[in-house]
């Protein structure tokens, strides 16, 4: 909501005020009253003038019930009714003492009573204050601490009925809920021990009576404010003043609102005089918390009147949202402040609007009272003949000045907000028209179909999976070709070394039980007869090996071997079963010319390839088949009796080349591989499928890998020039570099239901011309770089329905084109999807991209003409961060991000159509593009963003 900016100054003040209040409230919550068995004699002194006799009698009886040692009433000589009440009371309470005085004023009356009091503790009590049954007993408990000179009681309105009494009750309950316990907890000093009831050590206050009575302000004797005066005199001399919440007293409060308002004005003036006097003195700064409290109270009314000023200004400027927010906040904040009153009187929630208005009236009168400080007296009781009259024109002048302060402040707020808020909005409208072309054209129709993205032959090209066929009894090459509707020569090309037979190039009867690859009908072979001849030049089975060193080489077209077969030929020097079904390979194993190696749990559950600094065993296959079922294969340092953890000095590995396949089922491949040295002829990464340079499309390199684990390898698994592989249900984790790495020209893969996590760089990467692959239903998380990466001309791929989180990029597109990225859940990465190095014409749709630290989708570095539609982008810092041209951003839901769409640098001709931008914290659309360039807006919906649009103006 753009109105938020208008309210920032008010919000800053609000944060300041509420931070202070919360600090006070939190500290006050730890307050507890003093509980002990301390006892002392107590004298009650009460000044009486113009009191209701019935209330006075009730008060006397409540005091008597607390068993004080004496009650001293100092009654003005004109108040005959109260004198009569006290005389009657004296007949039943022998320690009652009456002093009839002709001295005007509450201070002299209190002083006279204090002088004749005999007890060590004196209670100064207003004549209309009613005590609870334990007021006295609890009130004197803090005096056990000899440093305590005064104790304040908790005060409440007795059965409030009128609006005035309820407002007064709210004020008292709040005061004894936060301010008073806060000060008592932090500094053992209070801003006032209220005159309704305060307990004092008489030996402390008797020497102060002259200063108490003879107070002057601006050359005039001060009449009212006796309670704050006495409090500050005690505190100035270093004595503690405590609050005792368990000592409860009650007052009726003024019934009429006009009387209550006069009381408030008198009390406000008293506070101004006493607080300014205290701040002028040095003593208060010995207690920094109290000094800060008094300064804060002095500033408060001036900040409080700003709120209605902002409200009025928002109405004048037509900022209805701001006005509504202000009213809502008024009621919410005042309801919080009313809480202690509402606990007692919950139905008083209905006077909340009155309390809101009154709070601002109270602020007004605080300013007004500052201008009329020397108007004083016991205003609500004194006869008009006793009051020092302030001329009417002086009151009028004070009101005029107060109103002028409000009006001038309002004018300044209006002018400033108009300049700082409305003027920029008008400028934004101009910049908006320059930065964006508004259009009603249907840009959704420009989003291509899947066939157009992947190409006209996409439905066929996508089906490049190589089928695995196990030869059955009686089958021939011709019958198998007929079964799968593929030409015989294509079947032979796909299985050179297995089915090609010498220089005559004819197909023998394949060995029953061997696996061959069925090529996809659309695969384009480039025949190379010299390769087929070379691959099939060893038609007879034999094993070649030196007696005690060097590799073990296995030959024989369509021969099937097991570890037992090999061991029978070469003995323990090359291969040994060290425990039941645990084998160790001590010398490299090389398979040639269509041989098949079977590793199955019926024979081997764990194959350990000896790997240490001076020995690296490996398994290499040339135009062969390796089948691995329910078997674990790892490196093994036989000197350490553990895996070879160090990949830096070389480590065991497995690799097959050219017309080969490796099929792996429910197995584990771990602790293999290292970084390939430049001069090394083989892929040493762990387990690898590698097509030789120049042989691509002359044959098929393939396999299927299902329900297996690849971990702690250099690469989890690596392919180069492979076709049509199936990777399903596997787990790749804790590998040094990649989890799964189909590299150059690996095409037509189906990668599904795999989990790849905690790998050193990418979870899954397709690098360099990897085409027509489908990556779906995988989980890739917590990898050192990206969850899934398409790298360098890896085009026409589908990335569908994957969960990607905890990576740097969820999906990274590096110079890759015409890929479909859909239905993925991409969250809690640094970047959700990143397109760079001229990644163009990709389709990103129906993804949920959320909670990414930096960007939801980031397109830059000439990544132009991509289609981003029907995605949900939420809670990212920037949902769409665009530094490219001609991208179609349509029909996306973009919500609760810092910025929805961020256009910058030379972004041009991007289409922003039919997006739903809502609840974005800063901006819906933010453009930092020079206005000489233009992007296109069409039918976007904005809802409850802080600002819908913002055009940066350098």
Image (cartoon, rainbow, N blue to C red):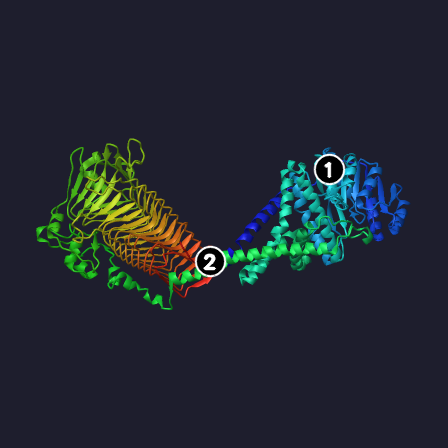
Find residue 833 and report its horizontal and vertical position in percent: 35, 53
Identity of the residue furthest to the right in this view: 91
Q: Nearer the viewer, residue 465 or 476?
A: 465
* Residue 191 seen in the current view: no
Which residue position holds label 2? 424
Label 2 crowd bin: few (<14), some (14–19), many (20+), radius 10 Å: few
Q: Is residue 637 visible?
A: yes
Q: Secondary structure at mark 1?
A: helix
Residue at x 23% of width, y 32% of height = 614
Assign a secondary structure to mark 2.
Answer: helix
In the rendered structure, the answer to whether residue 697 lies left or right of residue 787 reads left
Q: Quadrant of the C terminus?
A: bottom left
Q: Which residue is mark 1?
A: 234
Could you say where residue 849 lies in the image, as x and y percent from the top left?
A: 40, 55
Q: 126 or 280, which is in the foreground?
A: 280
Circle nearer the N terminus (1, 2): 1
Tally of marks: 2
Q: Quadrant of residue 863 in the image?
A: bottom left
Quadrant in the picture for residue 844:
bottom left
Q: Residue at x 71, y 34 (%)?
A: 237
Residue 412, by quadrant, is bottom right
Of residue 215 and residue 830, the one placed in the foreground of this image is 215
User: Crowding at label 1, few (<14), some or many (≥20) Cα neighbours within 10 Å?
Assistant: many
Residue 904: assigned label? none
């Amino acid at each position: 909501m753009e109105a938020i900016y208008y309210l920032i100054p008010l919000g800053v003040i609000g944060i300041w005020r509420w931070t202070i209040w919360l600090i006070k409230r939190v500290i006050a919550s730890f307050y507890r009253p003093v509980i002990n068995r301390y006892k002392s004699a107590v004298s009650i002194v009460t000044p009486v003038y113009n009191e209701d006799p019935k209330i006075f009698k009730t008060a006397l009886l409540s005091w008597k019930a607390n068993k004080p040692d004496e009650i001293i009433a100092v009654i003005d000589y004109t108040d005959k009714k109260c004198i009569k009440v006290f005389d009657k009371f004296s007949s039943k309470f022998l320690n009652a003492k009456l002093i009839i005085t002709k001295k005007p004023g509450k201070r002299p009356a209190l002083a006279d009573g204090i002088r004749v009091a005999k007890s060590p503790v004196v209670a100064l009590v207003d004549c209309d204050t009613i005590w609870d049954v334990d007021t006295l007993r609890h009130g004197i408990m803090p005096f056990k601490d000899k440093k305590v000179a005064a104790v304040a009681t908790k005060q409440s309105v007795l059965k409030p009925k009128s609006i005035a009494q309820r407002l007064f009750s709210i004020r008292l309950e709040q005061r004894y809920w936060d301010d008073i316990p806060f000060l008592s907890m932090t500094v053992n000093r209070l801003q006032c021990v209220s005159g309704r009831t305060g307990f004092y050590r008489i030996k402390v206050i008797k020497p102060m009576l002259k200063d108490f009575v003879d107070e002057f302000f601006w050359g005039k004797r001060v009449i009212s404010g006796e309670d704050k005066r006495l409090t500050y005199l005690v505190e100035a001399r270093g004595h503690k003043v405590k609050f005792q919440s368990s000592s409860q007293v009650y007052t009726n409060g003024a019934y009429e609102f006009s009387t209550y308002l006069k009381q408030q004005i008198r009390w406000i003036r008293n506070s101004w005089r006493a607080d300014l006097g205290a701040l002028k003195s040095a003593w208060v700064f010995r207690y920094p918390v109290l000094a800060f409290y008094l300064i804060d109270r002095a500033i408060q009314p001036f900040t409080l009147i700003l709120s209605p000023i902002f409200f009025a200004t928002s109405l004048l400027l037509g900022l209805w949202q701001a006005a509504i927010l202000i009213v809502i906040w008024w009621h919410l904040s005042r309801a919080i402040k009313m809480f202690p009153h509402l606990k007692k009187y919950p139905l008083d929630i209905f006077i909340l609007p009155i309390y809101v208005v009154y709070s601002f009236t109270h602020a007004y009168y605080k300013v007004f009272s500052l201008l009329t400080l020397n108007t004083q007296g016991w205003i609500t009781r004194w006869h008009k003949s006793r009051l020092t009259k302030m001329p009417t024109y002086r009151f009028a002048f004070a009101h005029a000045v107060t109103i002028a302060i409000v009006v001038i402040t309002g004018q300044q707020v209006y002018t400033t907000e108009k300049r700082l808020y409305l003027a920029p909005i008008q400028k934004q409208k101009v910049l908006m028209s320059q930065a964006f072309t508004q259009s009603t054209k249907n840009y959704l129709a420009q989003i291509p179909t899947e066939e157009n993205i992947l190409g006209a032959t996409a439905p066929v090209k996508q089906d490049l999976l190589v089928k695995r066929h196990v030869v059955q009894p009686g089958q021939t090459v011709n019958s198998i070709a007929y079964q799968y509707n593929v030409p015989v020569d294509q079947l032979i090309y796909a299985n050179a070394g297995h089915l090609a037979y010498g220089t005559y190039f004819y197909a023998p009867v394949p060995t029953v039980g061997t696996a061959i690859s069925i090529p996809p009908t659309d695969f384009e072979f480039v025949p190379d007869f010299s390769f087929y001849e070379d691959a099939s030049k060893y038609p007879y089975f034999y094993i070649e090996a030196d007696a005690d060193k060097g590799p073990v080489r296995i030959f024989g077209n369509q021969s099937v071997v097991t570890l037992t077969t090999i061991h029978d030929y070469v003995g323990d020097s090359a291969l040994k079963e060290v425990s039941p079904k645990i084998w160790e390979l001590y010398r490299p194993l090389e398979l040639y010319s269509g041989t098949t190696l079977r590793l199955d749990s019926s024979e081997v559950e764990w194959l350990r390839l000896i790997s240490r600094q001076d020995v690296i065993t490996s398994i290499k296959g040339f135009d062969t088949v390796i089948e691995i079922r329910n078997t674990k294969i790892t490196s093994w340092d036989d000197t350490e009796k553990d895996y070879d953890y160090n990949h830096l000095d070389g480590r065991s590995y497995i690799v097959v080349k050219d017309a080969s396949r490796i099929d792996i089922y429910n197995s584990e491949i771990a602790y293999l591989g290292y970084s390939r040295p430049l001069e090394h002829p083989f892929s040493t990464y762990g387990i690898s499928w590698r097509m030789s340079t120049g042989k691509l499309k002359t044959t098929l390199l393939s396999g299927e890998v299902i329900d297996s684990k690849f971990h702690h390898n250099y690469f989890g698994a690596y392919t180069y020039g492979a076709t049509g592989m199936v990777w399903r249900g596997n787990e790749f984790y804790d590998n040094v570099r990649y989890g799964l790495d189909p590299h150059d020209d690996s095409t037509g893969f189906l990668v599904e239901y795999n989990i790849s996590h905690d790998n050193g760089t990418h979870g899954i990467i397709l690098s360099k011309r990897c085409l027509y692959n489908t990556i779906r239903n995988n989980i890739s998380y917590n990898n050192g770089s990206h969850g899934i990466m398409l790298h360098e001309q890896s085009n026409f791929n589908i990335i569908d329905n994957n969960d990607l989180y905890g990576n740097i990029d969820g999906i990274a597109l590096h110079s890759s084109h015409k890929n479909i990225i859909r239905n993925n859940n991409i969250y809690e990465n640094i970047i959700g999807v990143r397109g760079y190095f001229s990644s163009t014409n990709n389709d990103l749709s129906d993804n949920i991209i959320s909670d990414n630290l930096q960007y939801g989708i980031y397109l830059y570095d000439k990544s132009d003409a991509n289609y981003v539609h029907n995605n949900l982008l939420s809670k990212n810092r920037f949902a769409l961060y665009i530094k490219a041209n001609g991208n179609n951003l349509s029909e996306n839901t973009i919500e609760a991000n810092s910025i929805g769409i961020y256009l910058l640098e030379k972004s041009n001709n991007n289409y922003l159509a039919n997006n739903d931008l809502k609840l974005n914290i800063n901006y819906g659309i933010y453009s930092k593009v020079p206005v000489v360039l233009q992007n296109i807006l069409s039918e976007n919906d904005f809802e409850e963003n802080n600002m819908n649009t913002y055009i940066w103006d350098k």
